[in-house]
Structures are given as structure tokens and as C-alpha cells.
Image (spheres, rainbow, N blue to C red):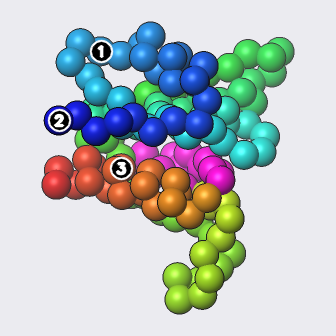
Amino acid sequence: MAQQVKYDRREQYEQIVSGLLPGETIIAVYDAVGIGTGFIGLTDRRVILQDKSFVGKRLALTSIPYAKVTAVSIVSNKSWAGSFFSSGNIAVHVGAHIFEIEVRGVEKTQHIHNVILHYATGH
């Protein structure tokens, strides 16, 4: 049985659906907090980031195949031993470039981290 897709905003989910490759499955689409990135999408093949920070109200939809991810980090002002944060940043390392996105809620932050780590390590 397929697991239900997790998403914050239907229009972001639909944007990811419209660009799926044949046989690709969406896992989650989470809205971003702050300036720059609009959302992060996770499929069974790649990470998809919408970046709204381009000049002239342009935006980019960037796909990162899991095979190209060299590391994934949870970035927080709190320690793992301390209380968790209401929002958290995920850093996706692709070679020398780092894509960072902030989402609301520890559950979403951990889910994104775990999905990327799972597919990037082939487990």
C-alpha cells in the first residue's frame, strides 16, 4: 500500500506533480520559511527546491538527484540533547555547493533529513 504524500500547500504539491518523471513518486512537499526558497519537494529520485530569490521576480526549480548529494545536515541553534526547535534548517550538500532551506517544525526537519539520507546512502 502506498504511503500518503505529506505536503503543506496544494499548489506546491501540484507543481511537483506536473514535473514528475515517468514512474517517479512524491514523498513530501514542505513550505519554506523566510526569504529565498519557496519549498522543498522530495521524491523517490531527487530533491526539488523552488528558489524565489532571483532578480526580476524570477524563480528557479532546482532538481538534485540523490546520487549527487554528498551530505545532508540539520542546522539548529539548539543542541540535540536540548529541546528541539520550532523551525529548522536543512542543508543539502552537492559537491562544494550547499542548498539551505528552513521549514516549520522538528517533525518536518527530521523527515526531510531522513528521506534524503536514506536515498543518498542507498538504504
Up-down: is 91 above or below 60? below
Residue on which disc 1 sits? 21
Residue lying at 68% horizontally and 75% vertically, measured from the top left: 77
Where are the magenta residues, as a range?
A: 90-104
Q: Circle 3: is it few (<14), some (14-19), or many (20+) Cα within 10 Å? A: many
Crowd band around label 1 with a 10 angstrom C-alpha radius: few (<14), some (14–19), many (20+): few
Percent from the top left, x then y, of residue 113? 42, 57
- The main secondary structure of the magenta stretch is strand
Disc 3 marks a residue whose amino acid type is Ile
* Residue under the image location 17 percent in, 35 percent down: 1
Residue farthest right in this picture = 56
The residue that mark 3 highlights is: 116
Residue 76: x and y in percent read 63, 70
First reached walking from the N terminus: tag 3 or tag 1: 1
Q: CA distance from mark 1 to mark 2?
A: 21 Å
Residue 92 visible in the shown view:
yes
Observer-nearest of 4 and 46: 4
Residue 32 at x, y percent in the picture: 66, 42
Q: Is residue 53 magenta?
A: no
Relative to 18, say whether 84 is above or below: below
Q: Which mark is residue 1?
A: 2
Of mark 3 and mark 2, the one earlier in the sequence is 2
Q: Nearer the viewer, residue 109 or 49?
A: 109
Whether residue 46 is visible, yes or no, is no
